[in-house]
């Protein structure tokens, strides 16, 4: 059998560029397209990536391959293939909670953890965490058993701000509110800028936790197409804003979940300029941001915020200590609303955990841990990709993430990832089906796999079992 195709995220960008070329009228029906080899050289990508871009257009009926001759234009009118303001879906209610409950009802079982987006516990700096807790316990004495009142410990806010300044953050310690993880930060941000019934523009596909938040707050989702290399498609976002006037845009411009996409810096600047022109806030979920970049991490959109329109949310949950629930929000001009919402809800923090996290950030231990963690993640991602390539059915497509540890896999039709999920549970394996990542049914044949695990024989054998299961469901022989 042919191996599943491993797709560089650049092929979608190149395919979109080729569509625009066809729509411009420069080429006529019957004209020869640029060759795959020349396209690869021009775009500085691999030959398979260039071929995949051309195959996208071929699948849409825009071009046709002729043996030993290349690709030729067979259709010019591409309006039906390119998203426009008329084609983009409108706002929709979100009803994810019942599905999520049914999928995670067995979460207490001991599963091979290919589903949950968490780093392997053995990859966390346990000794560093314990040492920091012991130091904080001695330093705080009895005060460590009290409350940490909003906006949170001053030393933790100061160390977060100092570290963020390295990538150009435009906030200080007084602009921060400490939260119980990034989820609470996002909830506070949404409460500060929206009312039940409002519309919020989100990525498509989107993190299912975002969808659950929208449902809980009574908000409607306005889905914006998102590219594995470029992130949110800004032209589509601009059109959607003009048509539907959302209360906010909620996105992960750096290491998006589930695609792993990171917007180039220039596009982040354009995104901030777009929302500032529109006069609406951007809620930036940057929970995976520290996993991007081999040295200095790239700037978040908050680095380009001059009007206070970007509400920046992040945490240590995906990198250091998921159970500590240390998050934060820098809300810009919405700081007062967010602080009041924090005080009105689950307002008390844990001083011991906040003090220990502050010490780890200040000591340099966090940076040393990040270097080791990113190396391990890279090895884990490559190991899972190799096993998917060897085990999954022909026609499987794997989007290679630019950073982070999530793998987005498109299974060949008519495979249903919800069926795969349920069959995998019976084998003691957890995976995340694509239906979780949209309020609609657009991603029925997609899976998200977590690669932030030690690539042990048990884990890799589990990946192979999922591949065998897909073969069985697709009626193919391995």
Image (spheres, rainbow, N blue to C red):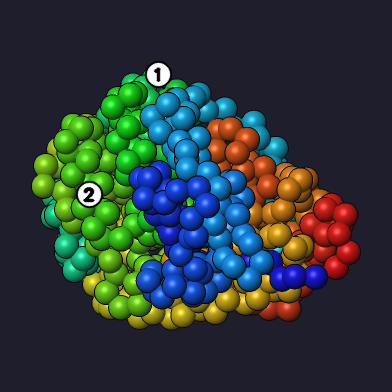
Instruction: For residue 101, say whether it is visible.
Output: yes
Closer-to-camera residue (153/327): 327
Where residue 105 appears, as percent x and y from the top left, is: 70, 42
Where residue 424 appears, as percent x and y from the top left, is: 78, 55
422 versus 133 height, above or below: above
Task: Please identify the quarter of the rendering in which residue 348 is found.
Answer: top left
Identify the residue under disc 1: 197
Asked whether, in this view, residue 450 is left or right of residue 351, the answer is right
Position of the C terminus by quadrant: bottom right
| Mark 1 to mark 2 CA distance (whole Å) | 28 Å
Mark 1 or mark 2: name the one nearer the start of the chain. Answer: 1
425 versus 8 height, above or below: above
Identify the residue under disc 2: 270
Q: Residue at x 83, y 59 (%)?
A: 471
**Element at label 2:** helix
87 versus 270 height, above or below: above
Image depth: mark 1 or mark 2 in front: 2
Task: Please identify the quarter of the rendering in which residue 195 is found.
Answer: top left
Q: Residue at x 44, y 68 (%)?
A: 39
Where residue 1 appears, as percent x and y from the top left, is: 80, 70
The label shown at residue 208 is none
Q: Residue at x 63, y 71 (%)?
A: 68
Most extreme residue toward the top is: 197
**Element at label 1:** loop
Where residue 402 appears, as percent x and y from the top left, is: 44, 66
């Amino acid at each position: 059998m042919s191996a599943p195709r491993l797709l560089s995220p650049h092929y979608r960008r190149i395919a979109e560029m080729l569509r625009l070329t066809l729509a411009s009228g420069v080429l006529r029906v019957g004209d020869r397209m640029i060759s795959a080899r020349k396209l690869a050289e021009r775009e500085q990508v691999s030959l398979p990536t260039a071929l995949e871009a051309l195959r996208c257009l071929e699948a849409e009926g825009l071009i046709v391959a002729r043996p030993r001759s290349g690709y030729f234009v067979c259709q010019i009118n591409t309006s039906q293939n390119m998203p426009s303001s008329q084609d983009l879906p409108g706002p929709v209610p979100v009803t994810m909670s019942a599905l999520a409950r049914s999928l995670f009802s067995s979460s207490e079982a001991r599963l091979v953890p290919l589903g949950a987006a968490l780093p392997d516990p053995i990859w966390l700096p346990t000794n560093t965490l314990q040492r920091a807790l012991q130091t904080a316990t001695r330093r705080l004495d009895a005060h460590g058993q009290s409350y940490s009142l909003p906006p949170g410990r001053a030393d933790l806010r100061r160390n977060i701000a100092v570290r963020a300044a390295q990538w150009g953050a435009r906030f200080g310690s007084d602009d921060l509110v400490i939260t119980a993880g990034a989820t609470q930060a996002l909830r506070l941000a949404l409460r500060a800028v929206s009312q039940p019934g409002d519309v919020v523009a989100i990525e498509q596909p989107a993190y299912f936790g975002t969808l659950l938040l929208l449902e809980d707050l009574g908000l409607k989702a306005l889905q914006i197409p998102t590219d594995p290399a470029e992130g949110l498609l800004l032209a589509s976002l601009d059109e959607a804003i003009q048509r539907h006037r959302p209360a906010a845009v909620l996105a992960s411009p750096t290491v998006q979940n589930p695609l792993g996409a990171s917007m180039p810096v220039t596009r982040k600047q354009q995104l901030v300029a777009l929302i500032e022109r529109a006069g609406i806030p951007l809620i930036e979920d940057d929970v995976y941001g520290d996993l991007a970049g081999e040295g200095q991490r790239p700037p978040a959109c908050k680095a380009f915020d001059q009007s206070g329109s970007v509400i920046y949310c992040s945490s240590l949950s995906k990198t250091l200590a998921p159970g500590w629930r240390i998050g934060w929000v820098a809300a810009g001009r919405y700081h007062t609303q967010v602080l009041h919402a924090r005080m009105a809800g689950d307002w008390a923090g844990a001083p011991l955990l906040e003090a220990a996290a502050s010490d780890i950030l200040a000591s340099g231990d966090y940076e040393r841990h990040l270097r080791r963690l990113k190396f391990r993640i890279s090895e884990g991602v490559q190991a899972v990709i190799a096993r998917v390539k060897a085990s999954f059915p022909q026609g499987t497509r794997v989007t290679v993430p630019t950073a982070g540890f999530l793998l987005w896999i498109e299974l060949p039709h008519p495979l249903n990832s919800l069926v795969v999920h349920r069959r995998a549970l019976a084998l003691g394996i957890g995976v995340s089906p694509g239906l979780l990542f949209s309020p609609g049914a657009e991603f029925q044949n997609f899976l998200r796999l977590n690669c932030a695990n030690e690539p042990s024989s048990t884990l890799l054998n589990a990946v192979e079992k999922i591949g065998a299961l897909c073969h069985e469901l697709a009626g193919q022989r391995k």
